[in-house]
Image (cartoon, rainbow, N blue to C red):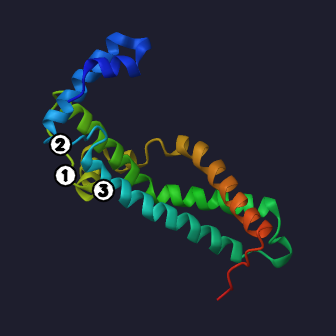
Amino acid sequence: MVKDETCEIKLPMIQGSATHLCKHAKLMKDNANSSWCFWGRRAFGPTLIGILPYAGLKFYIYEKLKRHIFEEHQRSIMMRLCCGALAGLFGQTFTYPLDVVRRQIRVENMQTFGGGSGARHKNTWQGITTIVSEQGWRQLFAGLSINYIKIVPSVSIGFTAYDMMKSWLRIPPRQKT
């Protein structure tokens, strides 16, 4: 069990909030059959289901785009940045609904532990269908444009750095099939 003193030591600037946080942590531990689930065990599935296709799509799209670039432009940093940006854009667009479901499940978990009603989404597929039926299909993409501001530059710089490091370390490129 978490002791109030431990929380007050970790959060000395907000002691009143630390005690409040500890009470909620105790409540969550008691309600979760003695296993910590602050972030929610039910959100773990949608997290994995979202991360794996996102990472795979990013690499697939990036490599596919690079293959369609003329040989004389293959070493261009601008080409790599553009291919990375498009890979991040498409990868995020295709997998964003899974991220929306994951966030809604996490919010439900926190509301359930705070005394709210039970879970509405039992799994990822039910989460998607519930969101579409209750809030409309556009809700699956709510906040995507703001996410582009973070993802597109991050992925383009990441892939450019990846390719530059491969060339500096003299790792040969993949053979075209």
Judging by the rendered image, the residue that carries numbered circle 3 is 45
Location of residue 72 by image quarter? bottom right
Question: Which numbered disc, 3 or 2, marks the residue closer to the eye?
Answer: 3
Q: Which of labels 3 and 1 is toward the front?
A: 3
Disc 2 designates what residue? 119
- Quadrant where the N terminus sits is top left
Q: Is residue 129 left or right of residue 172?
A: left
Spatial distance from mark 3 to mark 1, Cα to Cα? 11 Å
Q: Secondary structure at mark 3?
A: helix
Q: Label 1 neighbourhood size at 10 Å, few (<14), some (14-19), many (20+)?
A: few
Q: Is residue 139 above or below residue 54?
A: above
User: How many numbered badges does the structure rendering display?
Assistant: 3
CA gap between label 2 and label 1 equals 7 Å
Q: Which residue is mark 1?
A: 122
Residue in view at x 47 percent, y 60 percent: 94
Q: Is disc 2 placed on a helix, strand or loop? A: loop
Sequence order check, earlier mark of 3 and 1: 3
Q: Position of residue 92 (x, y in %)?
A: 51, 55
Q: Quadrant of the C terminus?
A: bottom right
